[in-house]
Amino acid sequence: AGGKAMSSSILSSSASYFGTGINFLREDHWESDYELSLHLHNYYAEAEYCNGNFSQVRKVTKTVIEKSRTFQDQLRANLVLMKTFNADNKLYAAMGIGIQVLNSLGKD
């Protein structure tokens, strides 16, 4: 439902659907339902970005980055976070994340 709402540009509903989905996850969801947790949190961050709820985006992407198992799993959250900082006119913060990502890509 959340994905359809995003593609239909009903972003407020989309964020609500993803938030509800996150609330229904088990307490240990990052261990027991990792892929679902990752997808729900990433979609929720993107929906909140589109809604202009930047403080919520920062909170959710922080969680994703902390709980991610791999660098690749962090990329989507980092992209949304960079876009958020850019939209919020925090260009140095956006560039800092971009540089961190590029540096990490060079290490592999």
Image (cartoon, rainbow, N blue to C red):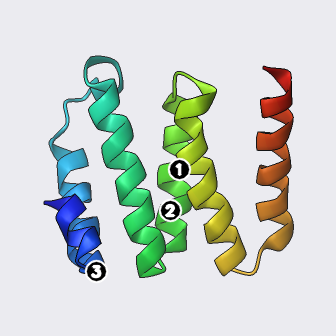
Name the disc covering residue 10, or none.
none
The amino acid sitting under disc 1 is: Thr
Mark 3 Cα shell of 10 Å, populated few (<14), some (14-19), many (≥20): few
Camera-side mark, 3 or 2: 3
Mark 3 residue element? loop
- Residue at 76% of width from left, 42% of height from top? 101
**What's the CA distance linking mark 3 and mark 2?**
18 Å
For mark 1, give the secondary structure: helix
Which quarter shows the C terminus?
top right
Give the quadrant of residue 6.
bottom left
CB atoms at circles 3 and 2 under 8 Å apart?
no
Give me the residue at 69% from left, 69% from top: 85
Question: Vertical placement of 71 versus 18: above or below?
Answer: above
Q: Position of residue 66 (x, y in %)?
A: 56, 33
Query: Image point 29% across, 77% down: which residue?
Result: 11
Q: Position of residue 74 (x, y in %)?
A: 57, 38
How far apart are the two marked residues, 3 and 1, measured between alpha carbons? 21 Å
Amino acid carrying mark 3 in the image: Ser
Residue 16 position, x and y percent, is 22, 67
Q: CA distance from mark 1 to mark 2?
A: 6 Å
Residue that carries the numbered disc 3 in the rendered image: 9
Q: How many marks?
A: 3
Residue under label 1? 61
Determine whether label 1 and label 2 are within 8 Å by CB.
yes
- First-in-chain label (3 vs 1): 3
Mark linked to residue 57: 2
* Relative depth, front residue between 82 and 24: 82
Q: Amino acid at mark 2?
A: Val
